[in-house]
Amino acid sequence: MFAEQGFHHATISQVAKEAGVADGTIYLYFKNKADILSHFFSYKTRLVFDRFRGAVDEAENAEDKLRNLIRRHLLEFQRDRNMAVVFQREALLARYVNEEYVKEITKMYLDILEEIIRLGQAEGTIRTGMPSGLVKRYILGAVNEVINTWVVTGGKHDLVEMADPLVALYFEGIGSR
Amino acid sequence: MFAEQGFHHATISQVAKEAGVADGTIYLYFKNKADILSHFFSYKTRLVFDRFRGAVDEAENAEDKLRNLIRRHLLEFQRDRNMAVVFQREALLARYVNEEYVKEITKMYLDILEEIIRLGQAEGTIRTGMPSGLVKRYILGAVNEVINTWVVTGGKHDLVEMADPLVALYFEGIGSR
Protein backbone atom coordinates (compact mmCIF):
# COMPACT_ATOMS: atom_id res chain seq x y z
CA MET A 1 0.00 0.00 0.00
CA PHE A 2 0.98 3.65 0.26
CA ALA A 3 2.23 3.51 3.82
CA GLU A 4 5.82 4.19 2.85
CA GLN A 5 5.65 6.86 0.16
CA GLY A 6 2.16 8.13 0.95
CA PHE A 7 -1.01 8.27 -1.10
CA HIS A 8 -0.31 11.99 -1.38
CA HIS A 9 2.65 11.24 -3.65
CA ALA A 10 1.11 8.30 -5.56
CA THR A 11 -0.06 8.64 -9.15
CA ILE A 12 -3.49 7.48 -10.34
CA SER A 13 -1.67 4.66 -12.20
CA GLN A 14 -0.11 3.47 -8.96
CA VAL A 15 -3.49 3.63 -7.25
CA ALA A 16 -5.02 1.60 -10.11
CA LYS A 17 -2.19 -0.93 -9.93
CA GLU A 18 -2.65 -1.38 -6.17
CA ALA A 19 -6.38 -1.85 -6.73
CA GLY A 20 -5.70 -4.37 -9.52
CA VAL A 21 -7.71 -2.44 -12.13
CA ALA A 22 -6.97 -0.40 -15.27
CA ASP A 23 -6.33 3.36 -14.94
CA GLY A 24 -9.54 4.06 -16.90
CA THR A 25 -11.61 2.06 -14.41
CA ILE A 26 -10.57 4.42 -11.63
CA TYR A 27 -11.92 7.35 -13.66
CA LEU A 28 -15.29 5.62 -14.07
CA TYR A 29 -15.82 5.96 -10.33
CA PHE A 30 -13.69 8.90 -9.25
CA LYS A 31 -12.98 12.32 -10.73
CA ASN A 32 -9.40 12.46 -9.44
CA LYS A 33 -7.15 11.52 -6.53
CA ALA A 34 -8.75 14.03 -4.16
CA ASP A 35 -12.11 12.44 -4.96
CA ILE A 36 -10.78 8.97 -4.04
CA LEU A 37 -9.45 10.32 -0.77
CA SER A 38 -12.73 12.07 -0.06
CA HIS A 39 -14.73 8.87 -0.63
CA PHE A 40 -12.30 6.81 1.45
CA PHE A 41 -12.60 9.31 4.26
CA SER A 42 -16.36 9.46 4.34
CA TYR A 43 -16.68 5.67 4.10
CA LYS A 44 -14.13 4.97 6.83
CA THR A 45 -15.36 7.83 8.97
CA ARG A 46 -18.95 6.61 9.04
CA LEU A 47 -17.79 3.12 9.91
CA VAL A 48 -15.37 4.17 12.63
CA PHE A 49 -17.66 6.76 14.18
CA ASP A 50 -20.48 4.24 14.47
CA ARG A 51 -18.08 2.08 16.47
CA PHE A 52 -16.95 5.04 18.60
CA ARG A 53 -20.58 5.86 19.32
CA GLY A 54 -21.30 2.23 20.22
CA ALA A 55 -18.30 2.05 22.56
CA VAL A 56 -19.30 5.30 24.31
CA ASP A 57 -22.94 4.21 24.66
CA GLU A 58 -21.93 0.89 26.26
CA ALA A 59 -20.52 2.66 29.32
CA GLU A 60 -22.52 4.22 32.13
CA ASN A 61 -20.32 7.00 33.48
CA ALA A 62 -18.04 9.67 32.00
CA GLU A 63 -14.72 8.04 32.89
CA ASP A 64 -15.77 4.66 31.44
CA LYS A 65 -17.18 6.39 28.34
CA LEU A 66 -13.91 8.24 27.78
CA ARG A 67 -11.91 5.05 28.36
CA ASN A 68 -14.09 3.14 25.88
CA LEU A 69 -13.72 5.93 23.32
CA ILE A 70 -9.93 6.08 23.60
CA ARG A 71 -9.59 2.27 23.58
CA ARG A 72 -11.77 2.00 20.48
CA HIS A 73 -9.96 4.90 18.79
CA LEU A 74 -6.55 3.26 19.34
CA LEU A 75 -7.93 -0.18 18.39
CA GLU A 76 -9.35 1.01 15.05
CA PHE A 77 -6.01 2.56 14.08
CA GLN A 78 -3.98 -0.40 15.30
CA ARG A 79 -6.16 -2.76 13.27
CA ASP A 80 -5.67 -0.86 10.06
CA ARG A 81 -2.28 0.79 9.77
CA ASN A 82 -3.00 2.04 6.24
CA MET A 83 -6.00 3.90 7.55
CA ALA A 84 -3.84 5.31 10.33
CA VAL A 85 -1.28 6.61 7.83
CA VAL A 86 -3.92 8.11 5.56
CA PHE A 87 -5.87 9.67 8.42
CA GLN A 88 -2.91 11.03 10.34
CA ARG A 89 -1.03 12.42 7.37
CA GLU A 90 -3.67 13.25 4.77
CA ALA A 91 -6.08 14.53 7.37
CA LEU A 92 -3.51 16.98 8.65
CA LEU A 93 -2.77 18.21 5.15
CA ALA A 94 -6.41 18.41 4.28
CA ARG A 95 -7.18 20.40 7.40
CA TYR A 96 -4.93 23.14 6.20
CA VAL A 97 -6.56 23.24 2.80
CA ASN A 98 -9.95 23.49 4.50
CA GLU A 99 -11.37 20.18 3.40
CA GLU A 100 -14.85 20.17 4.83
CA TYR A 101 -15.00 16.47 5.62
CA VAL A 102 -11.95 16.59 7.86
CA LYS A 103 -13.43 19.52 9.73
CA GLU A 104 -16.60 17.47 10.13
CA ILE A 105 -14.68 14.47 11.51
CA THR A 106 -12.91 16.68 14.02
CA LYS A 107 -16.19 18.27 15.01
CA MET A 108 -17.86 14.88 15.46
CA TYR A 109 -15.04 13.81 17.75
CA LEU A 110 -15.08 17.03 19.74
CA ASP A 111 -18.86 16.73 20.10
CA ILE A 112 -18.51 13.27 21.65
CA LEU A 113 -15.89 14.66 24.04
CA GLU A 114 -18.17 17.59 24.91
CA GLU A 115 -20.97 15.16 25.75
CA ILE A 116 -18.67 13.08 28.00
CA ILE A 117 -17.30 16.16 29.77
CA ARG A 118 -20.80 17.47 30.48
CA LEU A 119 -21.89 14.11 31.82
CA GLY A 120 -18.83 13.97 34.07
CA GLN A 121 -19.53 17.47 35.34
CA ALA A 122 -23.15 16.52 36.05
CA GLU A 123 -21.94 13.37 37.88
CA GLY A 124 -19.35 15.38 39.78
CA THR A 125 -16.42 13.31 38.47
CA ILE A 126 -15.10 16.03 36.14
CA ARG A 127 -14.21 19.52 37.34
CA THR A 128 -16.29 22.49 36.23
CA GLY A 129 -14.99 25.93 35.32
CA MET A 130 -12.37 24.70 32.84
CA PRO A 131 -12.23 26.23 29.33
CA SER A 132 -14.19 23.59 27.41
CA GLY A 133 -12.53 24.12 23.99
CA LEU A 134 -9.10 23.73 25.54
CA VAL A 135 -10.07 20.58 27.46
CA LYS A 136 -11.24 18.94 24.24
CA ARG A 137 -7.99 19.87 22.43
CA TYR A 138 -6.01 18.55 25.38
CA ILE A 139 -7.71 15.16 25.06
CA LEU A 140 -7.65 14.95 21.25
CA GLY A 141 -4.05 16.22 21.06
CA ALA A 142 -2.62 13.54 23.32
CA VAL A 143 -4.41 10.66 21.60
CA ASN A 144 -3.33 12.01 18.19
CA GLU A 145 0.25 12.33 19.35
CA VAL A 146 0.23 8.74 20.64
CA ILE A 147 -1.06 7.50 17.26
CA ASN A 148 1.42 9.66 15.33
CA THR A 149 4.31 8.30 17.34
CA TRP A 150 3.07 4.77 16.69
CA VAL A 151 2.81 5.44 12.91
CA VAL A 152 6.23 7.13 12.73
CA THR A 153 7.99 4.39 14.72
CA GLY A 154 6.60 1.74 12.39
CA GLY A 155 3.57 0.56 14.35
CA LYS A 156 5.49 -1.99 16.36
CA HIS A 157 4.34 -1.47 19.95
CA ASP A 158 0.83 -2.18 21.21
CA LEU A 159 -1.29 0.93 20.81
CA VAL A 160 -4.41 -0.16 22.69
CA GLU A 161 -2.55 -0.70 25.95
CA MET A 162 -1.83 3.04 26.01
CA ALA A 163 -5.55 3.76 26.51
CA ASP A 164 -5.82 3.16 30.25
CA PRO A 165 -2.68 5.07 31.32
CA LEU A 166 -3.71 7.91 28.98
CA VAL A 167 -7.19 8.17 30.51
CA ALA A 168 -5.58 8.10 33.95
CA LEU A 169 -3.40 11.04 32.88
CA TYR A 170 -6.42 12.95 31.53
CA PHE A 171 -8.22 12.53 34.85
CA GLU A 172 -5.39 12.82 37.34
CA GLY A 173 -2.81 14.93 35.49
CA ILE A 174 0.87 14.67 36.34
CA GLY A 175 0.70 16.62 39.62
CA SER A 176 1.23 14.84 42.91
CA ARG A 177 -1.47 16.82 44.75
CA MET B 1 3.96 34.13 1.95
CA PHE B 2 3.04 30.47 1.59
CA ALA B 3 0.56 30.41 4.46
CA GLU B 4 -2.43 29.86 2.20
CA GLN B 5 -1.29 27.34 -0.40
CA GLY B 6 1.68 25.96 1.51
CA PHE B 7 5.39 25.93 0.75
CA HIS B 8 4.91 22.25 -0.01
CA HIS B 9 2.97 23.18 -3.15
CA ALA B 10 5.05 26.20 -4.17
CA THR B 11 7.47 26.09 -7.12
CA ILE B 12 11.07 27.33 -6.91
CA SER B 13 10.01 30.27 -9.10
CA GLN B 14 7.35 31.26 -6.59
CA VAL B 15 9.88 30.95 -3.78
CA ALA B 16 12.32 33.16 -5.72
CA LYS B 17 9.58 35.70 -6.46
CA GLU B 18 8.63 35.91 -2.76
CA ALA B 19 12.29 36.37 -1.90
CA GLY B 20 12.66 39.06 -4.59
CA VAL B 21 15.51 37.27 -6.37
CA ALA B 22 15.98 35.44 -9.68
CA ASP B 23 15.33 31.70 -9.85
CA GLY B 24 19.03 31.10 -10.52
CA THR B 25 20.04 32.89 -7.33
CA ILE B 26 18.08 30.38 -5.29
CA TYR B 27 20.10 27.59 -6.88
CA LEU B 28 23.38 29.29 -5.91
CA TYR B 29 22.50 28.72 -2.27
CA PHE B 30 20.16 25.73 -2.23
CA LYS B 31 20.07 22.44 -4.08
CA ASN B 32 16.29 22.24 -4.22
CA LYS B 33 13.12 23.03 -2.27
CA ALA B 34 13.78 20.34 0.32
CA ASP B 35 17.17 21.94 0.93
CA ILE B 36 15.55 25.36 1.55
CA LEU B 37 13.13 23.80 3.98
CA SER B 38 15.93 21.97 5.71
CA HIS B 39 17.98 25.19 6.15
CA PHE B 40 14.93 27.13 7.31
CA PHE B 41 14.21 24.44 9.85
CA SER B 42 17.68 24.23 11.29
CA TYR B 43 18.03 28.02 11.45
CA LYS B 44 14.66 28.56 13.11
CA THR B 45 15.06 25.55 15.33
CA ARG B 46 18.36 26.69 16.81
CA LEU B 47 16.93 30.15 17.41
CA VAL B 48 13.70 28.94 18.99
CA PHE B 49 15.31 26.22 21.08
CA ASP B 50 17.79 28.67 22.56
CA ARG B 51 14.81 30.72 23.71
CA PHE B 52 13.03 27.63 25.06
CA ARG B 53 16.16 26.71 27.00
CA GLY B 54 16.45 30.25 28.35
CA ALA B 55 12.82 30.31 29.44
CA VAL B 56 13.15 26.93 31.21
CA ASP B 57 16.38 27.94 32.94
CA GLU B 58 14.84 31.15 34.30
CA ALA B 59 12.43 29.19 36.51
CA GLU B 60 13.30 27.39 39.74
CA ASN B 61 10.80 24.57 39.99
CA ALA B 62 9.25 22.05 37.58
CA GLU B 63 5.81 23.65 37.33
CA ASP B 64 7.27 27.10 36.60
CA LYS B 65 9.71 25.60 34.11
CA LEU B 66 6.90 23.82 32.27
CA ARG B 67 4.79 27.00 32.31
CA ASN B 68 7.69 29.05 30.92
CA LEU B 69 8.32 26.46 28.22
CA ILE B 70 4.68 26.33 27.09
CA ARG B 71 4.32 30.13 27.22
CA ARG B 72 7.47 30.60 25.16
CA HIS B 73 6.43 27.85 22.73
CA LEU B 74 3.04 29.50 22.13
CA LEU B 75 4.62 32.97 21.97
CA GLU B 76 7.15 32.01 19.29
CA PHE B 77 4.43 30.57 17.07
CA GLN B 78 2.05 33.46 17.69
CA ARG B 79 4.77 35.94 16.75
CA ASP B 80 5.51 34.26 13.46
CA ARG B 81 2.48 32.70 11.85
CA ASN B 82 4.44 31.70 8.73
CA MET B 83 6.79 29.71 10.89
CA ALA B 84 3.79 28.12 12.61
CA VAL B 85 2.31 27.05 9.27
CA VAL B 86 5.62 25.68 7.99
CA PHE B 87 6.42 23.88 11.25
CA GLN B 88 2.98 22.45 11.86
CA ARG B 89 2.31 21.33 8.32
CA GLU B 90 5.70 20.62 6.79
CA ALA B 91 7.03 19.12 10.00
CA LEU B 92 4.20 16.65 10.11
CA LEU B 93 4.73 15.68 6.52
CA ALA B 94 8.46 15.46 6.98
CA ARG B 95 8.08 13.25 10.04
CA TYR B 96 6.47 10.62 7.92
CA VAL B 97 9.22 10.74 5.32
CA ASN B 98 11.76 10.32 8.14
CA GLU B 99 13.47 13.67 7.85
CA GLU B 100 16.18 13.55 10.44
CA TYR B 101 15.99 17.19 11.47
CA VAL B 102 12.34 16.95 12.44
CA LYS B 103 13.10 13.87 14.52
CA GLU B 104 15.88 15.84 16.17
CA ILE B 105 13.56 18.77 16.99
CA THR B 106 11.05 16.41 18.51
CA LYS B 107 13.77 14.69 20.51
CA MET B 108 15.12 18.03 21.78
CA TYR B 109 11.65 18.98 22.95
CA LEU B 110 11.02 15.62 24.58
CA ASP B 111 14.41 15.85 26.33
CA ILE B 112 13.48 19.19 27.88
CA LEU B 113 10.19 17.66 29.05
CA GLU B 114 12.05 14.66 30.48
CA GLU B 115 14.30 16.97 32.45
CA ILE B 116 11.33 18.93 33.85
CA ILE B 117 9.45 15.75 34.77
CA ARG B 118 12.48 14.33 36.63
CA LEU B 119 12.97 17.58 38.50
CA GLY B 120 9.29 17.60 39.49
CA GLN B 121 9.55 14.01 40.66
CA ALA B 122 12.64 14.87 42.72
CA GLU B 123 10.80 17.88 44.21
CA GLY B 124 7.72 15.78 44.90
CA THR B 125 5.45 17.97 42.75
CA ILE B 126 5.10 15.44 39.90
CA ARG B 127 3.88 11.88 40.46
CA THR B 128 6.26 8.99 39.97
CA GLY B 129 5.43 5.63 38.40
CA MET B 130 3.87 7.08 35.25
CA PRO B 131 5.03 5.79 31.83
CA SER B 132 7.51 8.54 30.94
CA GLY B 133 7.21 8.27 27.13
CA LEU B 134 3.45 8.60 27.35
CA VAL B 135 3.62 11.60 29.70
CA LYS B 136 5.85 13.45 27.25
CA ARG B 137 3.49 12.68 24.33
CA TYR B 138 0.55 13.81 26.45
CA ILE B 139 2.22 17.20 27.01
CA LEU B 140 3.52 17.68 23.45
CA GLY B 141 0.26 16.47 21.89
CA ALA B 142 -1.92 19.01 23.66
CA VAL B 143 0.32 21.99 22.92
CA ASN B 144 0.58 20.90 19.26
CA GLU B 145 -3.18 20.54 19.01
CA VAL B 146 -3.67 24.02 20.47
CA ILE B 147 -1.26 25.49 17.89
CA ASN B 148 -2.85 23.51 15.03
CA THR B 149 -6.29 24.75 15.95
CA TRP B 150 -4.95 28.30 16.04
CA VAL B 151 -3.34 27.91 12.58
CA VAL B 152 -6.43 26.27 11.05
CA THR B 153 -8.83 28.86 12.45
CA GLY B 154 -6.73 31.68 10.97
CA GLY B 155 -4.63 32.68 13.99
CA LYS B 156 -7.17 35.11 15.35
CA HIS B 157 -7.40 34.31 19.06
CA ASP B 158 -4.59 34.87 21.56
CA LEU B 159 -2.42 31.77 21.74
CA VAL B 160 -0.21 32.69 24.71
CA GLU B 161 -3.14 33.02 27.09
CA MET B 162 -3.77 29.30 26.62
CA ALA B 163 -0.49 28.49 28.38
CA ASP B 164 -1.58 28.82 32.01
CA PRO B 165 -4.89 26.89 31.71
CA LEU B 166 -3.02 24.22 29.72
CA VAL B 167 -0.35 23.80 32.38
CA ALA B 168 -3.09 23.64 35.02
CA LEU B 169 -4.69 20.81 32.99
CA TYR B 170 -1.36 18.97 32.72
CA PHE B 171 -0.90 19.12 36.48
CA GLU B 172 -4.44 18.69 37.75
CA GLY B 173 -6.14 16.76 34.95
CA ILE B 174 -9.88 17.00 34.41
CA GLY B 175 -10.90 14.81 37.36
CA SER B 176 -12.60 16.35 40.38
CA ARG B 177 -10.76 14.15 42.89
Image (cartoon, coloured by chain):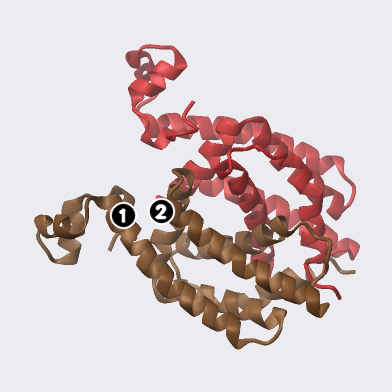
Chain colours: A red, B brown
The front one of B97 and B16 is B97
Which disc number belongs to residue B164?
none
Element type where label 2 sits in the image: helix
Crowding at dot 1, Cα within 10 Å, few <14 / some 14-19 / many 20+, comes out as many
**Residue depicted at x 67% and y 61%:** B136
Q: Quadrant of residue A127?
A: bottom right
In the image, residue B46 sits, relative to residue A44, either above or below, namely below
**Residue depicted at x 58% and y 76%:** B69
The front one of A23 and B92 is B92
Residue A23 image offset from top left, x and y in percent: 34, 16
Element type where label 1 sits in the image: helix
Residue A85 visible, this angle: yes
Disc 2: host chain: B
Q: Are the residues at dot 1 and dot 2 in contact (C-beta closer than 8 Å)?
A: yes
Which disc number belongs to residue B90?
2
Amino acid at the residue labelled 1 = Phe
Lateral position of residue A12 relative to residue B152, left or right: left
Which disc number belongs to residue B7?
1
Crowding at dot 2, Cα within 10 Å, few <14 / some 14-19 / many 20+, comes out as some
**Residue depicted at x 88% and y 63%:** A125
